[in-house]
Amino acid sequence: MNRDSTKAQMSVDFLLGMVIFAGVFFFIFQFSAAAVSPFVFTSEEVPTKTQSVADNLYFDKLSDGEKGMLNLTYLEENNESIHQLETDLGVESPRHGVNVTVSEIDSDDPPDFAVRDDGSTNSPPEVGASVSRTVRYGQVADDGGLTEFDEGDKVFVRVRVW
Amino acid sequence: MVSRGKLTVDADSGRGSRGQVHTIEGFTAGFIILVAALYGVQAVAITPTSSSTASQEVELNQYKLADDVISTSNSNGELKEALLNWSASDNHTVEDGEFRGSLAETNYYGGTAEGPFMFGAPIPGDFGETLNQTFTQRGLVYNVEIECARDSGGSQTYIDNGDPSLHSVTASTRVALHEHDTVYDNESDNVTLAEVETADDTEMEFYCDRMGSNGDDTSLYNVVEVRLTIWRM
């Protein structure tokens, strides 16, 4: 009787041990994943950042008051400094990169205007980097001194983030 | 005998204990299988009809573009001009007026093979040109629907290119129409919405009635909601 009871006790111990082990394993798995998630790239991060940057640019930096009417003064003032643009739009360089181009809707290629880094084109994203892009539409209400555009031009503002 | 009997009792008692443990093990195993199955179902959620992160990004980009186009067109006056490009006369192929240059036997623009504005052909006016340059040339199809304010005319189709796909997106804006805004009579002369409203119903019609009554101390005629729906072919 004692021998059989002992066997049963051992089985319960084993089950209890397995449950505790699985619970600890599950906890560590969950905790470690949550602990590192703020520091790793996710598939949603770049598209979300792209929308954030584009909204900031479209509704704040380029807004002329009425929705869709654009004032390009900001781009003219920051034409030679992609770094200022990155700072203003909340792009954490070098973790992320950004590229902004503006073109009339009937002349897509090449873009009429691009923010340049010290006179040269921005560094392209690394090979294999996650790149997200969005296109915003608006009408130039104030060309801000940019000779590429006239007031009344309809333009696409393309934002690319990686 | 005593010894044998004792052994028999012990053996029965042992089987009873093992049975309890087997029951617990069975429940535990069932629970583990259930959790594993649930985890598997949660982990593999991609079906032919489920939307992925990529398609959500595409739809969001399309929505933003549609919202930009309809809002900008409202801001620069193109949209209102399009809404008022209306021939109010009954003396056309369609009774109760029509958008000028609309499809034969309809009062709107569209993409049917019978009409002059098959898909890809521009809709008249600056708003039509904007739609063409922003959507048609990018392989996007669009419908535009006008909704009059409540109890003042219902809805009116502006552009009909067929049924939208499951992944279509819709952006909307509101446009205020005033009594002094003009449409066209059968001689292509300007006629105000107030004149259309007071004309005999058999002579001229606009797709929205005046909100409230003519005695109101306001020149506001109606506030229409314009819905732009776009989708990829």
Image (cartoon, coloured by chain):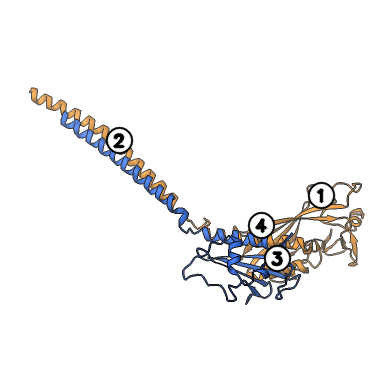
- Residue A21, compared with residue B23, is above or below; it is below
Query: Which residue position is annotated with label 2?
Result: B24
Q: Nearer the viewer, mark 4 or mark 1?
A: 4
Q: Which class describes the residues within 10 Å of circle 1: few (<14), some (14-19), or many (20+)?
A: some
- B53 horizontally vs B119: left or right: left
Disc on res. A138: 3
Q: Colour of chain A?
A: blue
- Circles 4 and 2 in contact, beta carbons < 8 Å: no
Q: Nearer the viewer, mark 3 or mark 1?
A: 3
Which amino acid type corresponds to the residue marked 3 in the rendered image? Gly
Which amino acid type corresponds to the residue marked 1 in the rendered image? Ser
- Residue at the image position 52 percent from the left and 58 percent from the top: A45
- A141 horizontally vs A55: left or right: right
Query: Which residue position is annotated with label 4?
Result: B170
Query: Which residue position is annotated with label 1?
Result: B152
- Residue at the image position 19 percent from the left and 32 percent from the top: A6
